[in-house]
Image (cartoon, grey):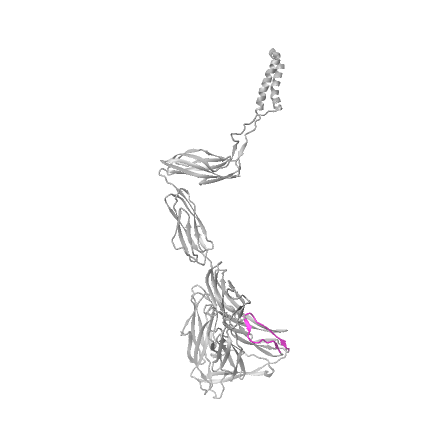
C-alpha cells in the first residue's frame, strides 16, 4: 500500500514465497525517490530473501484464495476469473471441482495433477438474482482438498430491487464525468460528490462504493440512506508517474478511472467516470536506465469471430512482460459486458510475465460488430494501457421482448397478469426445458411450447406471468426460461406492490327514535378506508322512508381516506319503520348492511295515546298446553289526551281451544298511563253439543243407602215406649222402604263423570290487541301484537 509517504509515515510491503528448488533465495529491491536539496534523488534499498523448500505433502492450494467479481447483470455470462490449482503433495491426485450456484466453469476443468504440478482453469459469474452472491469453490483430490471464496453482485440492467431513487451531484462535467485537472505527480487533490435519496418515503440500501488506483474513495454513507437524506463520497487523486531522465515524455500523463456505486436504486449500479492528468517526475539517472516499472503486451488488439448471442467464444491470451527494473503491480482490469477478462496477474517481478484470458460474450444482436478495449491500470510509468477488442455477434437463438415486468399495485387476494414475448431468431429450433417464476409470481407457458417441446426458428410465443400478492408490500421475483439455446436461463425481473383495502363503517347502525309522520330527521355515519389500496365502485342504497346523501364523492375512497354519509328518516306512516342501508364496493366485505330503526307517530290536535305490550309494539310468551299466557299492556296519553279507551282482542293466527281475555276491557285515561292484562288461555271444557253426564249406581251403593234408615227405624221401635211405634208394624216398614228408595236415588247421583277438557296443540300463534277511542272527532286506533308459543 506504498505510494507517496508523508514525513513520519510508514507503509507495509507483503512478500509471498512460492517454494521452488530453483528459487531458494532472492532479494527484494525497493526504489525510493526523495527530494534532497530540491532535486529528486533515487535510492534503491535491497532486502535479502531466503526460504526453505520441503517435499512434505502440503495438500492442494487454489490461487487466488478469494476473488471479487464485482457487479454483473443477471441472466447473461459475465466476468470470468482464472484460478490455479497447485498439487503440493508428492502424489498424483485425481481432481474434482465443485462450484457454488451461479458460478460455472468457462474452461476445461482440471482432471488430475502429477506430484507438485499445477493446472489452470477459469470460472464465470452468472448471477440469476439481485443482490450479493457468495460461494466457495472446492477442489477435491483424495485425501486432501483446497478451496477459494467467490463473491459477486447480481443486478438487472437498469432495474433495482428497492423503491428508493439515487441522485449524484457535485462538480460533474457533461456526461457525468468528474475531472481532477492536472497536478504534479506525487501530490494529491480531492473532489466531493453528494449522494441523495430523492424518494420521499422509501429508504435506499447502499451496498458498496469502490474506485481504482490512482483514485481512492472514502464515504460518509452508511448501509442505509433514509428518504430525502444525503451523504458524501470523497475522492482523492494521487498520481505517481515517473519517467527516466532524458526520455521523451508528454507534458502530462492522463489517468482515468471509474467510481462504482452499488445500491438497490433502479439505476444501480451507477458509474461516474474519473479523469485527471499528472506532470511526471523525471528521474535523475542516465538515459539508458530502464523505467522502474514497465510492461509490454504481446498483442495490442484482439479480434473474435462470429459468436452467437448468449454464448461465450473460445478464449484468447495476451501476455504481459515486465520490462522494467522494479516489480510491476497490476492494480485493476476492466472491459465492457460484451467481453470478459481474467488473469493471474498481480505482482510481476522484473523479467517475469503473466497471462490475460479474454472471451467474447455478445449480449444482444442489435449491433453485429462490437468494439471495446481492456483497460489495465498499474504502477507502470504509463499507468493506463488499452488493448483493443473487436467481436462480431451472430443471431441469438432466443430473445425476450423485455428484461423486467412491473405489475403496479394489486390487492392481496386478487391477481394480475402480464405477458412477455419469447422469440427464436436463430436458424434452428430451440427446445424449451423449463419456465418458472419465483416469489408471489407464477408462470404459464401461454402460447409457448411446453417444456420438452421446441420453438421453431423465426417463431415467437408469449409467456404469461401472474402476480398474486400474499402481503401488503413490494414483492419481487424472477421469471426464468431455460432452453437448449442458451447456457444460462433467460431471466425477467418481476416487481409489484401488494395492497389491502378495508372499509370501516362507524357507527354500525342508526336509530332515529319516534318521529311525527310528515316530518324528517337526519343522522350521519362515516365511511373510512383503513387499508393500503383504494376502494372503488362504492354505491349506497336505502329502503322505504330513508334517503341517503354523501358529503363527498364516494365512488372511490383512497387508502386512508374517509367520507361522511347522511341518512334522513321521514316516516310515511305511524308505527315502527325499520329499514336498511346497503353499501356495495370493491372491498372484500361487500355488501355491508347498516340497520336503520325509527318509528312514525300521528300528532292529533286534541291528543292521542300509545299502546305497548311489555314496553314494545310486540310481545311473546311461551307456555305449556293448559297454562295461561299473560301480557302486560300499557296505555300512555300524549298531548294531554283524556277519555275512555276500549280494548279488544282478535286472533291473527289462532290456536284451537285457546281464547283471549282482557282485564279490564276498557279504561279511562287522564294525565297518567293505565295498565291492563291480556290473557291467552290454552285449555277449554268439552264442547256444548256433547252427551250429558250419566248417573250410575251399584248394588253396594244401594245397600249402603238403605242401611242407615233401617238402623234408625229398628232402634226407635225397640227403645220407644210409645204404643204407636210398637203398633206401627207393616205400615212403618212401608214408609221406611219408600224413604230408602228415595235416598238410594240421591246417593246414586253423587257418582257423575266430569266434562272432558281440550288443550291447545303445540305451535306458534298470534293475536292482536286493539285500543280504540276518539280524540275530538278523530278516531284513534293503536294495536300491539301478541305472539304465543305452545309447547
Compared to residue 37, the image places residue 123 above or below, namely: above
Q: Nearer the viewer, residue 781 or 505?
A: 781
Residue 114 highlighted magenta (yes or no): no
Measured as percent of width and height from the top left, residue 226 is found at: 45, 65
* Side (left or right) of 153 relative to 92: left
Measured as percent of width and height from the top left, residue 202 is found at: 45, 64
Residue 101 highlighted magenta (yes or no): yes
Count the marks: how many?
0
Compared to residue 597, the image places residue 410 above or below, namely: below
Q: Is residue 733 visible?
A: yes
Q: Which of 305 and 14 is in front in this view?
A: 305
Measured as percent of width and height from the top left, residue 737 is found at: 60, 17
Which residues, given as a range, are shown in magenta? 91-113
Compared to residue 624, the image places residue 106 above or below, namely: below
Taking the spot 58% from the left edge, 18% from the top edge, the residue there is: 739
Q: Nearer the viewer, residue 11 or 123?
A: 123
Q: Can residue 1 be seen in this view?
A: no
Q: Nearer the viewer, residue 429 or 592?
A: 429
Compared to residue 561, the image places residue 456 above or below, namely: below
- Residue furthest out toward the top: 723
On the image, which quarter does residue 84 sit in? bottom right
Measured as percent of width and height from the top left, residue 678 is found at: 46, 35
Amino acid at each position: 500500500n506504498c505510494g507517496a509517504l508523508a514525513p513520519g509515515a510508514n507503509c507495509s510491503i507483503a512478500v509471498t514465497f512460492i517454494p521452488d528448488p530453483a528459487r531458494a533465495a532472492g532479494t527484494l529491491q525497493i526504489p525510493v525517490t526523495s527530494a534532497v536539496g530540491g532535486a529528486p534523488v533515487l535510492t534503491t534499498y535491497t532486502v535479502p530473501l531466503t526460504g526453505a523448500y520441503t517435499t512434505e505433502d502440503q495438500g492442494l492450494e487454489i490461487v487466488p484464495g478469494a476473488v471479487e467479481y464485482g457487479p454483473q447483470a443477471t441472466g447473461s455470462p459475465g466476468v470470468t476469473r482464472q484460478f490455479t490449482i497447485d498439487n503440493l503433495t508428492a502424489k498424483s491426485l485425481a481432481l474434482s471441482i465443485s462450484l457454488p450456484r451461479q458460478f460455472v466453469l468457462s474452461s476445461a476443468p482440471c482432471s488430475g495433477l502429477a506430484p507438485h504440478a499445477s493446472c489452470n482453469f477459469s470460472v464465470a459469474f452468472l448471477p440469476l438474482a439481485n443482490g450479493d452472491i457468495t460461494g466457495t469453490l472446492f477442489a477435491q483430490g483424495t485425501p486432501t482438498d483446497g478451496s477459494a471464496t467467490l463473491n459477486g453482485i447480481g443486478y438487472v440492467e437498469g432495474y433495482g430491487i428497492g423503491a428508493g431513487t439515487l441522485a449524484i451531484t457535485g462538480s460533474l462535467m457533461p456526461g457525468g464525468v468528474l475531472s481532477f485537472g492536472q497536478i504534479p505527480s506525487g501530490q494529491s487533490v480531492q473532489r466531493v460528490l453528494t449522494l441523495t435519496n430523492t424518494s420521499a418515503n422509501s429508504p435506499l440500501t447502499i451496498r458498496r462504493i469502490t474506485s481504482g488506483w490512482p483514485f481512492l474513495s472514502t464515504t460518509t454513507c452508511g448501509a442505509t440512506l433514509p428518504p430525502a437524506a444525503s451523504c458524501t463520497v470523497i475522492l482523492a487523486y494521487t498520481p505517481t508517474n515517473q519517467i527516466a531522465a532524458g526520455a521523451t515524455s508528454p507534458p502530462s500523463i492522463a489517468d482515468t478511472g471509474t467510481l462504482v456505486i452499488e445500491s438497490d436504486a433502479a439505476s444501480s449500479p451507477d458509474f461516474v467516470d474519473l479523469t485527471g492528468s499528472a506532470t511526471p517526475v523525471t528521474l535523475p539517472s542516465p538515459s539508458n536506465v530502464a523505467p522502474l516499472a514497465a510492461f509490454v503486451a504481446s498483442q495490442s488488439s484482439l479480434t473474435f469471430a462470429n459468436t452467437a448471442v448468449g454464448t461465450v467464444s473460445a478464449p484468447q491470451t495476451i501476455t504481459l512482460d515486465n520490462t522494467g527494473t522494479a516489480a510491476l503491480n497490476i492494480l485493476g482490469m476492466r472491459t465492457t459486458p460484451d467481453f470478459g477478462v481474467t488473469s493471474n496477474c498481480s505482482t510481476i517481478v522484473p523479467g517475469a510475465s503473466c497471462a490475460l484470458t479474454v472471451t467474447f460474450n455478445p449480449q444482444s444482436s442489435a449491433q453485429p460488430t462490437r468494439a471495446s478495449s481492456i483497460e489495465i491500470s498499474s504502477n507502470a510509468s504509463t499507468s493506463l494501457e488499452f488493448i483493443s477488442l473487436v467481436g462480431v455477434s451472430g443471431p441469438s437463438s432466443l430473445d425476450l421482448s423485455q428484461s423486467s415486468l412491473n405489475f403496479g399495485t394489486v390487492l392481496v387476494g386478487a391477481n394480475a397478469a402480464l405477458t412477455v414475448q419469447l422469440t427464436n431468431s436463430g436458424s434452428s429450433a430451440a427446445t424449451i426445458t423449463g419456465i418458472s417464476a419465483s416469489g408471489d409470481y407464477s408462470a404459464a407457458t401461454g402460447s409457448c411450447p411446453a417444456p420438452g417441446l421446441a420453438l421453431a426458428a423465426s417463431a415467437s410465443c408469449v409467456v404469461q406471468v401472474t402476480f398474486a400478492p400474499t402481503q401488503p408490500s413490494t414483492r419481487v421475483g424472477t421469471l426464468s426460461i431455460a432452453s437448449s439455446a442458451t447456457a444460462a436461463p433467460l431471466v425477467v425481473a418481476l416487481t409489484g406492490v401488494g395492497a389491502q383495502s378495508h372499509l370501516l363503517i362507524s357507527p354500525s347502525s342508526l336509530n332515529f327514535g319516534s318521529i311525527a309522520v310528515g316530518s324528517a330527521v337526519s343522522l350521519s355515519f362515516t365511511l373510512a378506508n383503513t387499508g393500503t389500496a383504494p376502494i372503488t365502485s362504492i354505491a349506497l342504497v336505502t329502503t322505504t322512508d330513508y334517503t341517503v346523501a354523501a358529503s363527498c364523492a364516494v365512488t372511490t375512497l383512497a387508502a386512508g381516506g374517509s367520507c361522511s354519509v347522511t341518512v334522513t328518516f321521514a316516516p310515511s306512516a305511524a308505527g315502527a319503520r325499520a329499514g336498511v342501508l346497503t353499501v356495495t364496493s370493491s372491498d372484500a366485505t361487500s355488501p355491508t348492511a347498516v340497520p336503520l330503526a325509527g318509528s312514525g307517530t300521528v300528532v292529533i290536535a286534541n291528543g292521542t295515546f300509545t299502546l305497548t305490550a311489555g314496553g314494545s309494539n310486540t310481545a311473546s310468551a311461551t307456555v305449556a298446553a293448559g297454562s295461561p299466557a299473560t301480557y302486560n299492556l300499557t296505555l300512555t296519553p300524549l298531548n294531554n289526551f283524556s277519555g275512555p279507551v276500549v280494548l279488544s282482542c282478535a286472533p291473527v293466527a289462532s290456536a284451537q281451544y285457546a281464547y283471549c281475555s282482557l282485564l279490564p276491557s276498557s279504561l279511562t285515561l287522564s294525565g297518567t298511563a293505565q295498565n291492563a292484562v291480556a290473557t291467552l288461555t290454552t285449555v277449554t271444557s268439552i264442547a256444548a253439543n256433547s252427551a250429558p253426564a250419566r248417573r250410575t249406581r251399584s248394588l253396594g251403593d244401594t245397600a249402603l243407602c238403605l242401611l242407615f234408615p233401617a238402623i234408625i227405624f229398628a232402634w226407635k221401635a225397640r227403645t220407644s215406649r210409645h204404643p204407636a211405634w210398637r203398633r206401627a208394624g207393616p205400615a212403618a216398614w212401608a214408609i221406611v222402604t219408600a224413604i230408602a228408595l228415595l235416598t238410594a236415588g240421591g246417593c246414586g247421583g253423587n257418582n257423575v263423570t266430569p266434562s272432558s277438557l281440550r288443550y291447545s296443540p303445540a305451535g306458534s300463534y298470534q293475536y292482536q290487541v286493539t285500543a280504540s277511542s276518539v280524540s275530538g272527532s278523530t278516531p284513534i286506533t293503536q294495536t300491539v301484537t301478541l305472539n304465543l308459543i305452545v309447547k
